Image (tube, rainbow, N blue to C red):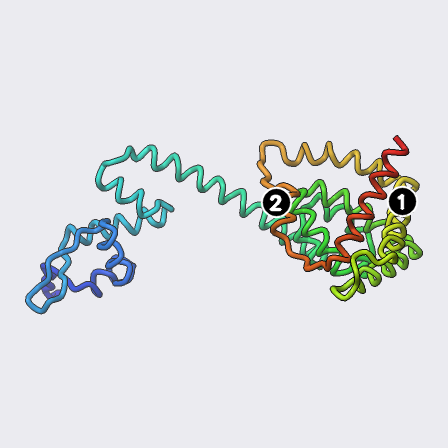
Amino acid sequence: MYPSVTPPREVKIGDAAAFAGTTPRAIRHYHQIGLLPEPERGGDGRRRYGYHDMIRLLWIRKMSEAGISLDDMRAAFDEARDIEDVLGRLEETLAAQETDIKHQRAAVQRLRVVGSPLGLLSPLVTDRLTHLPPDALRPSDLDALLVTERILGPLGAAIQASVLITLATHPDLRAEADRLDAADAALDDTVDPHDPQIEKLAAQHCAHHKALLQAIEAAGLDTAEEKLFEIYDTETSGEEDVQMSAFEAVTKMPYGFSAARTRCMELTAQLLDADLSAGS
């Protein structure tokens, strides 16, 4: 003989949640947003859930597993929106998620191969620098690439990589870059922005920049840069890459430069611009 079991007419919220595979907190939220009608309370002040409530909870669970949002569920139950519209937008969302997952997997694979934060940058940047020795790139180099990629995109950072390749393969230029960096760091708030030494330092920066360009051209890196444009156009076809303008970036990226250091940068830019105009 099998024991006779009589199902309850109504159940408490804990039992409803357990059967539907959800939580009492989630059910209360469904009540708040109007997704699940709130049943009347019993004599003990507690809600009681019947057959139709459980059916609604089970459908909510199934739609949630399919990725349908709570708002879309409510619209579907109310028949306020065509289910095809809901499913169409869901497919678009899933396609975007698949693209994100693809990019995340590619980033993880690059990190496994490169073994450094360099792998977190775009493939266009990473591919240009993976041939360098592990200690050739400094943390400050990667920081600079990160900022450039944010402002100018992968192409801008990949072009900047030519400078890092040159510094890594020319010890004399790296030593001069280190000396100039130290001189820049010494331009704190105690230095007068009109100190004559700042003009000399700006001239040295200009000379070093021209030496870098000569080394880049001698190594054929400028030719490699031209090919980057074609590669970038192919890899990003159909994809939107949103960057902020350089002006907007300047107003949002803090560096804390002193007035003296800022003037040195301005003078360097003016010298480089004058030199470019004279050569054209």
Instruction: Estimate the spatial distance between the alpha carbons at disc 1 and disc 2, rounded to whole Å.
Output: 28 Å
- Position of residue 176 in the picture relative to residue 112 (left or right): right
Q: Position of residue 69 (x, y in %)?
A: 34, 46
Q: Which image quarter is the C terminus in?
A: top right
Left or right of residue 231, residue 65 in this image: left
Which one is nearer the viewer's eye here, 164 or 211?
Answer: 211
Q: Amino acid at mark 1?
A: Lys
Per the image, label 2 sits on a secondary structure element best described as: helix
Q: Position of residue 28 (x, y in %)?
A: 24, 59
Answer above or below: position of 164 versus 76. below
Q: Residue furthest left?
A: 43
Label 1 sits on residue = 210
The tag earlier along the polypeptide, 1 or 2, is 1
Q: Depth check: give the residue in front, 214 or 235.
A: 214
| Residues tagged 1 and 2 counted as in contact (Cβ below 8 A) | no
Q: Which residue is located at x 84 percent, y 61 percent? A: 183
Q: Nearer the viewer, mark 1 or mark 2?
A: 2
Residue that appears at 9% across and 69% down: 44
Residue plotted at (13% across, 56% down):
39
Of residues 1 and 70, which is closer to you in this image? 70
* Residue 92 drawn at (x, y percent): 44, 37
User: Height in image: 108 above or below 279?
Assistant: below
Residue at the farthest top position: 280
Percent of width and height locating residue 13: 20, 63
Within 10 Å of the Cα at label 1, are there few (<14), some (14-19), or many (20+) other Cα atoms?
some
Please tell me the numbered disc located at residue 91: none
Residue 248's disc number: 2
73 vs 212, left or right, is: left
Query: Foreground residue, 267 or 232?
Result: 267
Instruction: Give SS at disc 1.
Output: helix
